[in-house]
Image (cartoon, rainbow, N blue to C red):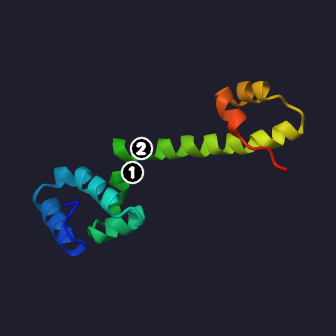
Amino acid sequence: MLVEPETTVIKEAKTLIERAPEHLNFIEQVFFYKFKDLSRKEILKMLSIREEFEEELKKTRAYQEILQEGRQEGLKEGKLRAVAFLRELGVSDEVIAERLELPLDEVKKVQSKQ
């Protein structure tokens, strides 16, 4: 599926979903990899997956893991953005790392605003 042309892979995927719906998670993973520039909704539409199924997808372990990883990355990014501001207030890198629960080496890598 990864090396097939787009039109062929879509037909194959739809056929496989109809015959073996238990392989849907695998097919979705392949599509997420193959079509990196498409959103999840676009991929589900491409595979003709109804909105009701989308709700079921949200309950899957894979979806929950992806969601949690995104939340953690967002939280970390927010903390790293606060570093320069805290430095301006005179807070040391050591205290910033401790209070924000970040590794000291990551705090030290953050560039101060100039």
- In front of the other: 74 or 107: 107
Placement of the N terminus among the 4 image quadrants: bottom left
Q: Amino acid at mark 2?
A: Gln
Observer able to see residue 92: yes
Left or right for 36, reference 75: left
Numbered circles on residues, count? 2
Residue 52 is situated, as x and y percent measured from the top left of the image, at 33, 61
Observer able to see residue 101: no
Q: Amino acid at mark 1?
A: Lys
Q: Is residue 60 above or below residue 21?
A: above
Q: Is residue 15 above or below residue 110?
A: below
Q: Residue at x 30, y 71 (%)?
A: 46
Check the image and name the residue furthest to the left: 19
Check the image and name the residue furthest to the bottom: 7
Residue that carries the numbered disc 2 in the rendered image: 64
For mark 1, give the secondary structure: helix
- In front of the other: 14 or 83: 83
- Residue 45 sits in quarter: bottom left
Going from N to C along the chain, the mark reached first, 2 or 1, is 1
Disc ID at residue 110: none
Instruction: Report how far apart the C-alphas of labels 2 and 1 lie in the structure.
Output: 7 Å
Residue that carries the numbered disc 1 in the rendered image: 58
Left or right for 104, reference 1: right
For mark 2, give the secondary structure: helix
- Residue 65 sits in quarter: top left
Using a 10 Å C-alpha cutoff, classify the residue at mark 1 as few (fewer than 14 neighbours), some (14 to 19) or many (20 or more): few
Q: Residue at x 35, y 44 (%)?
A: 62
Residue 73 is situated, as x and y percent measured from the top left of the image, at 56, 43
Q: Are circles 2 and 1 on residues that touch, CB within 8 Å?
A: yes
